[in-house]
Amino acid sequence: MLELSAACYRKTEHWAPVSQLGGKPTAKMLGELLMDQFATTTEALDRSRIKRNFVVSTMLDLPFTSGWLAWSDIAGAAADSRPDLPGFDNLITGYECASWGYCLRYAFQDMNPGDMIAISILDINVMNISYWESNPNWGNSGFGLATIVLTLGEENQVECHIAKSVNAFGEFCLDLSRVSREQTDVMLVPPYFPSDIAAMYAKIVPQEQRTENLVDDWGHCFGADPWVGLIEEVARGNDWQNTTYFATSVALNGYWTYAKLKLNPTGLFKILPPLGVPMMEVAA
Amino acid sequence: MTLEYRSFLHEHPFENEVISGDFNSLQLETADDFAAYRAMAIADWPPILVSFSQKYQILDKVLETVETHLDDDYDVLLMTLRVPGAMRFPKRYYSERVFLVADLEMEKKRLLEWNKRVLVVQEGLVLHPMETGQNELFLTLHNPKSDAGSRFAACSEGLEALGFIPEKPLAKAG
């Protein structure tokens, strides 16, 4: 089974003062932040076992599609800041909040038991675009960066699904119910949604088989939700050492994903101090 | 060794179809919204030939054509499927052999180090004035089998039938 070997999350405010300096300075700061958090998260791990190192995002697509940000600039800045650490492989946004699961599915084809994969889930409202602040589809957004490291076991259950109908969220909830019935000993970690929306899965997945919907504390953190949820399991002193979890994420357009895992009993699972709005000096 | 096909769409592929205006533009409300869009807007761009749903229709046909002719010729198909968030991508893009990345070059390089047969599909079908692209469709097959040339040529013909013409880009509008 997969092991979550380490996971860190930090909240961030918007980066409008940075983005006003342009795409290149923004890329540099993003690269440095990604690498700094990767270094913290992997400090106690054998980094030579990390075979893939992806960054995923739901909301940072348009800055790349427009050419305002270039992934090579971010990866380059990250590598420059810590050339002694494994660099970042690529950015994946196409599967939205479910991107982490599609990365796992893809990467596992070339990985072996004992290998590690790192994924950074980056959803910072870099340009402070109001659309992303909140939305009827997901409520208030929670912006931040999650860094997770997973270790492959002998048999690893990762599922990637795509909806067949227009009611993608309904299909996702029904599928959560299926999993809860098929594997009664697992705890589902559903994404955070306002209670009116989460009611769809709350009604059909038994309460004892799902972690708490902490949307009032965190907002909807896009693909980071289940990883925040797992860190919270540790922080709240729940019985995480003896629990098998299903991390889950769903994308607005109808992709969803699961990963079945246990947490490393000695792993680092931490909420890092939040980042405020960066204050930038503007040249006279 | 590589096989390469470089083409451009230069006519509306669904010229006489009535379509819905399916571009749900993000609302501009705050000063930061306007600043963001000003920063991301591109000053000159090629003609917009497809709507969001039409783009996914034609990209589905592109993958169908690839599967028809090259199904046994690649291990991984790398692609940048741009503008997620608009609507669900076609089911063919859900295949385990397809992976959507921001930087084709970086992932291709790694896969070639592992001696994979890689088909790279670069699409630049432009939908709005905040997208880079020249309405291009480039296919590059890396590490092909020795007899893949004829199949690649047949695939190229299939793509041409969809309207992707192997030629230089049109002059930019405006």
Image: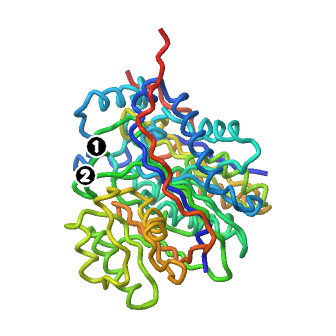
Q: From this viewpoint, which residue is outermost toward the left? A: A196
Q: Residue at x 39, y 41 (%)?
A: A13
The quadrant of the picture occupied by the C terminus of chain B is top left
A236 vs A214, left or right, is: right
Q: Quadrant of residue A164?
A: bottom left
In the visual, does A219 lie left or right of A144?
left
Can residue B161 be seen here? The reply is: no
Type of amino acid under label 1: Tyr
Label 2: how many residues lie within 10 Å, few (<14), some (14-19) or many (20+)?
Answer: few
The percent position of residue B162, horizontal first and vertical second, equals 46, 52
Query: Where on the picture, by quarter, is residue B130?
Result: top left
Q: x and y percent of residue A43 in the render?
A: 68, 55
Chain ID at mark 1: A
Residue farthest front in this picture? A237
Q: Is residue A158 visible?
A: yes
Residue pointed to by mark 1: A131
Where residue A73 sits: x, y (%)? 61, 35
Secondary element at image label 2: strand
Say if A98 sits above or below B50 in the image.
below
Of A98 and A166, the residue lying toward us: A98
Of B107 and B174, which appears nearest the observer? B107
* Numbered label attached to residue A15: none
Q: Are marks 2 and 1 in contact (CB under 8 Å)?
A: yes
Callout 2 and callout 1 share a chain: yes
Whole-Å distance between the Cαs marked 2 and 1? 7 Å
Q: Which residue is mark 2?
A: A135
Render colour scheme? rainbow
Mark 2 residue type: Asn
Q: Chain of mark 2?
A: A
Provide the secondary structure element on which disc 1 rests: helix
Q: Rate crowding at label 1 as few (under 14), some (14 to 19) or many (20 or more) other CA atoms within 10 Å.
A: some
Observer-nearest residue: A250 or A283? A283
